[in-house]
Image (spheres, rainbow, N blue to C red):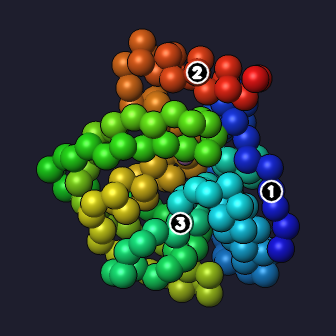
Amino acid sequence: MALLKVLKVPDPRLKLKAHPVEKVDADIQRLMDDMLETMYHDKGCGLAATQVGIQKRIVVIDFADERTPKPLLMANPEIVWYSDRREAFTEGCLSVPNQWTSIVRASSVKFQYLDRHNKRQELTVDGILGACIQHEIDHLNGVLFIDHLSSLKRNLLLRRAIKLKED
Ligand code: NI
């Protein structure tokens, strides 16, 4: 396994849209494993391939939640249902260093993905894990959690994150 470099704002590659993978083969499994190692190393609980400069629809998540496989390694994750009910959770992101803020999202979602063995899976989750799935899939579409904020608040967090990186 190998550690990958996590891109930080304002890297323009964070805005790129990732492409679906055809199949979870040995190369994709290796990427999933490297992303997981990188996520543990940087003390994150979710990481999207976009954040390591690879435009493939791959997400890894590890969360203290007994209802889902741990870790959750996903190719082509796609949300197929959003609850009408919405809920706010405090979010942060390895690509936006040391900034945390409350983001309102659907309080539960149903999603499908290919697992590490190329098997199609479907899960319905709520709580912070539901927020995390939405956050990571946003990354695959070039969207950061701060993009859900007003431009005033977004720019404040962005400036702080960039300043931290330069210090
Ligand atoms: Ni993130």
Q: Residues within 10 Å of mark 2 (few under 14, many from 20)?
A: some
Q: Would you name the residue on which mark 1 appears?
A: 4
Q: Residue furthest top?
A: 152
Tag of residue 160: 2
Q: Residues within 10 Å of mark 1 (few under 14, many from 20)?
A: some
SS for dot 3: strand
> Which comes before the other along the chain, label 1 or label 3?
1
On screen, 12 above or below 24? above
Separation of marks 3 and 2 at Cα, in angstroms: 26 Å
Q: Position of residue 128 (x, y in %)?
A: 34, 58
Q: Look at label 2 and name its amino acid.
A: Arg
SS for dot 2: helix
Separation of marks 2 and 1 at Cα, in angstroms: 24 Å
* Disc 3 C-beta below 8 A from ligand 1: no
Q: Residue furthest left?
A: 85
Residue located at (45% from left, 49% from top): 135
> Which comes before the other along the chain, label 3 or label 2?
3
Circles 2 and 1 in contact, beta carbons < 8 Å: no
Q: Nearer the viewer, mark 2 or mark 1?
A: 2
On screen, 44 above or below 158? below
Q: Position of residue 110 (x, y in %)?
A: 31, 66
Quadrant location of the C terminus in the rendered image? top right
Tag of residue 61: 3
Q: Residue furthest front?
A: 167
Circles 3 and 2 in contact, beta carbons < 8 Å: no
Residue 40 figure quarter:
bottom right
Instruction: Specify whether 81 is left or right of 122.
Output: left
* Disc 1 C-beta below 8 A from ligand 1: no
Residue located at (34% from left, 38% from top): 103
Instruction: Specify whether 89 is left or right of 46.
Output: left
